Amino acid sequence: MTLEVEHQLCYSYSDYVSLNPHYFFLSPKATPYQYLVSHDLSVLPSPDLLNKNIDQEGNIQHVCFINSKVKTFKVNSKFVLQSDAFKGLNFVIFPFECATIPFKYPKRMAKYVEFILNSKVIPDDINDFAKKIMDKVNYNTLNFLMEVTTHIHKNFRYISRERGDAELAAETLKNKSGSCRDFSVFMMDVCASAGVLARFVSGYLYGSELHQHDLHAWVEVLLPGGGWRGFDPTEGRVVDKNYIALAASIESAGLSPVGGTFRSSACVESVLHTKVTIKEISKNSLENGIEA
């Protein structure tokens, strides 16, 4: 299918401000099943420099410099993406012993993965939660991931929260509620408790009444033989062609579509208005340059 995505952001300030460099994560990450057909990124006022690069974790990033003082700052990203059907669990875990948790990552991955996992401090209640799930699925790796994904969806209450960083995993477990960001961070820590590396993904989800008009967050898990595979604990399912990833990181913070700060000698208030529109378009309309 062919999807057209438009993401509008407008920052308004109560007085003129100077903008520090801003960072955009508004370009879809390439996957074997998705490719970008076109992308138009517009910024007002016109930037003095808009630099496109790759960040330290392989995400497409724009760095924006505006030297003039502003009272409004608008960013509009519109792209067309071809997204082909695929089966998220259509792979073979290899080495075969990795089909059971906990497992040792192969040598090429091991030193990086172990460094990240060993740096995490997992609370006891998260370890207890992970242990109960592992026992329930008899320590099968894929069954563990699916059970965590569906358990959160079925037993935790979803709360829409557009702004702010994700809650700590222990807080989400205690409240048994949270946003998609909270559920993703919680699942990342549960995976880490089982010795499995997971990362936070920010992007869009087409076809969901709950998430289609805003950013969404989910998890990708690094599996030997499978690479990074997506699981959505909020929706309770494996990631498919309806998901569009903008950026992924082993940390949840810092993946906002637009990030940056402003300077002013006065006390200034800022307000952000956003709008996300996702729709499927026909191949004929794409070829003719008109909307379906």
Image (cartoon, helix red, strand yellow):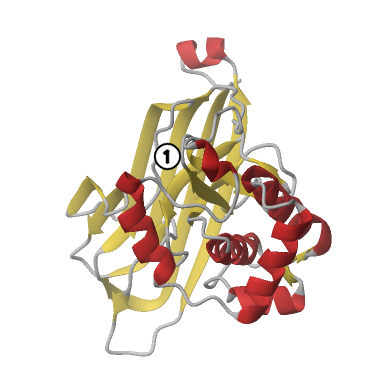
Residue depicted at 27% across the width and 52% down the height: 55
Q: In the rendered image, which quarter contains the C terminus?
A: top right
Q: Quadrant of residue 2?
A: top right
| As drawn, 91 above or below 191 | above
Of residues 7 and 109, which is closer to you in this image? 109
Residue depicted at 55% across the width and 9% down the height: 284
For residue 48, side relative to residue 244 (left or right): left
Residue depicted at 52% across the width and 19% down the height: 290
The local secondary structure at tag 1 comes to loop
Residue 240 in view in this figure: yes
Q: Quadrant of residue 56?
A: bottom left
Of residues 194 and 30, which is closer to you in this image? 194
The spot of residue 195 in percent (x, y) is 52, 60
Q: Residue furthest front?
A: 97
Query: Which residue position holds label 1?
Result: 28
The spot of residue 267 in percent (x, y) is 38, 90
Of residues 242 and 151, which is closer to you in this image? 151
The spot of residue 146 in percent (x, y) is 70, 47
- Crowding at dot 1, Cα within 10 Å, few <14 / some 14-19 / many 20+, comes out as many
Q: Amino acid at mark 1?
A: Pro
Q: In the rendered image, which quarter contains the N terminus?
A: top right
The spot of residue 87 in percent (x, y) is 62, 27
| As drawn, 222 above or below 81 | below
Q: Quadrant of residue 30?
A: top left
Q: Residue furthest right?
A: 154
Of residues 90 and 84, which is closer to you in this image? 90
